[in-house]
Amino acid sequence: MSERCGYLGGGRYNHCDGGTRSTVMLDVEDLWGGITHVCVRPGITDLQPYVTYRISGAWWNGGVGCTPGRH
């Protein structure tokens, strides 16, 4: 069974791209409400290395075609 799409908890995000190999920009929220933008490729990404504090959530902000890891 595969992981669901979107924020998985524990700082992990699963970008399900439907086979397009697209990259997307996420808004990643820390426990204090701060937002960091992180670009991810398809599959599961550990977002914690890009954020100073513990992550409370992440969601796609509509951006596509970015360079993975950039923010």
Image (cartoon, rainbow, N blue to C red):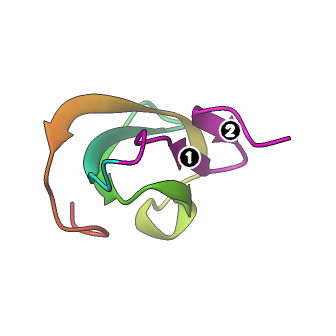
**Is residue 23 toward the left or the right of residue 67 in the image?**
right
Q: Nearer the viewer, residue 49 or 40?
A: 40
Asked if the residue under mark 2 is in contact with the one under mark 1, i.e. CB atoms within 8 Å, the reply is yes
Residue 37 at what x, y percent from top left?
A: 26, 48
Residue 25 at what x, y percent from top left?
A: 25, 45
Q: Give neighbour class at mark 1: few <14, some 14-19, many 20+ (Cα, 10 Å).
A: many
Identify the image quadrant of residue 57. top right
Rendered residue at 72%/48% (across/down): 10
What residue range appears in magenta?
1-19
Rendered residue at 18%/67% (across/down): 67
Give amino acid for label 2. Leu
Rendered residue at 27%/54% (across/down): 23
**Is residue 53 toward the left or the right of residue 66 in the image?**
right
Rendered residue at 68%/38% (across/down): 8
Label 1, secondary structure: give it: strand
Q: Which residue, given by chain and number where applicable, does mark 2 sit on?
A: 8
Q: Nearer the viewer, residue 53 or 39?
A: 39
Give amino acid for label 1. Tyr
Looking at the rendering, in which quadrant would you find the N terminus? top right
